[in-house]
Image (cartoon, rainbow, N blue to C red):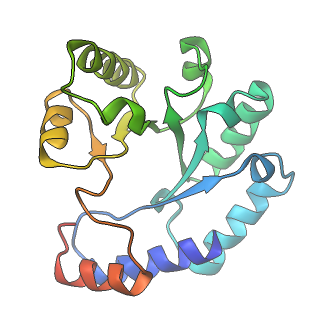
């Protein structure tokens, strides 16, 4: 997390005056259950100087559902720092709508298993539309994973998806290559 926040701060320096950049970091079940997690995150933010709003902590749907009361409590403490939270791999676990509305999250990340075959059938589009509509009704932004081509992106935009990630935008990059990309193409 320390390196991710340090790198995000460096990349923000390359994008002064451009659209905001945020860094997402996955939390493991072990990290989420760590009693000093909030203090550790606060320390990393202080040390790196990263604006807390620029950090998104991602918790997979299955991990979030393991101990809901404890997860909700930890999420609330993390939110008090100003960081944003995301439920990752949504649709692969067993989150009920009752639980989803209890989680103090900002983003719902739709698993690639839903986006990979968008356009293959009416059922796929209906499922994605329902997920996006529910997320928006709960005031969540929706990020779709696994976007491989412009057609997928266009269909997701038609459905109202807010954000997307995948090979359509870029293959995974080294920090140096990402720095070069951000410096030369600030709209990325």
* Quarter of the picture holding the C terminus: bottom left
The quadrant where residue 125 appears: top left
Look at 19% across and 39% down and name the residue there: 152
Determine if residue 123 is in view.
yes
Could one spot residue 49 in this view of the protein?
no
Work out whether 140 lies above or below 170. Answer: above
Q: Give the total of numbered labels.
A: 0
Q: Position of residue 153 (x, y in %)?
A: 18, 42
- Taking the spot 69% from the left edge, 36% from the top edge, the residue there is 63
Q: Is residue 175 above or below residue 88?
A: below
Viewed as shown, does residue 165 lie left or right of 51? left
Q: Quadrant of residue 5?
A: bottom right
**Viewer-closest of 89 and 83:** 89
- Pinpoint residue 156: horizontal percent, then vertical percent: 21, 34
Horizontal side of 181 relative to 85 (left or right) equals: left
For image coordinates 59% across by 25% down, the residue present is: 93
């Amino acid at each position: 997390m320390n390196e991710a926040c340090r790198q995000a701060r460096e990349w923000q320096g390359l994008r002064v005056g451009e659209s905001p950049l945020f860094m997402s970091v996955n939390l493991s079940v072990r990290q989420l259950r760590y009693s000093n997690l909030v203090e550790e995150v606060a320390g990393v933010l202080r040390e790196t100087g990263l604006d807390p709003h620029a950090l998104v902590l991602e918790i997979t749907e299955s991990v979030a559902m393991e101990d809901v009361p404890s997860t909700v409590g930890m999420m609330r403490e993390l939110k008090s720092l100003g960081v944003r939270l995301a439920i990752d791999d949504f649709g692969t676990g067993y989150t009920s709508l009752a639980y989803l509305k209890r989680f103090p999250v900002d983003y719902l990340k739709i698993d690639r298993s839903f986006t990979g075959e968008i356009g293959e059938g009416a059922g796929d589009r209906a499922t994605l539309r329902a997920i996006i509509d529910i997320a928006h009704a709960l005031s969540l932004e929706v990020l779709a994973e696994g976007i491989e081509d412009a057609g997928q992106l266009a269909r997701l935009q038609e459905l109202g998806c807010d954000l997307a990630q995948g090979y359509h935008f870029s293959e995974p990059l080294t920090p140096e290559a990402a720095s070069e990309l951000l410096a030369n193409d600030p709209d990325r």
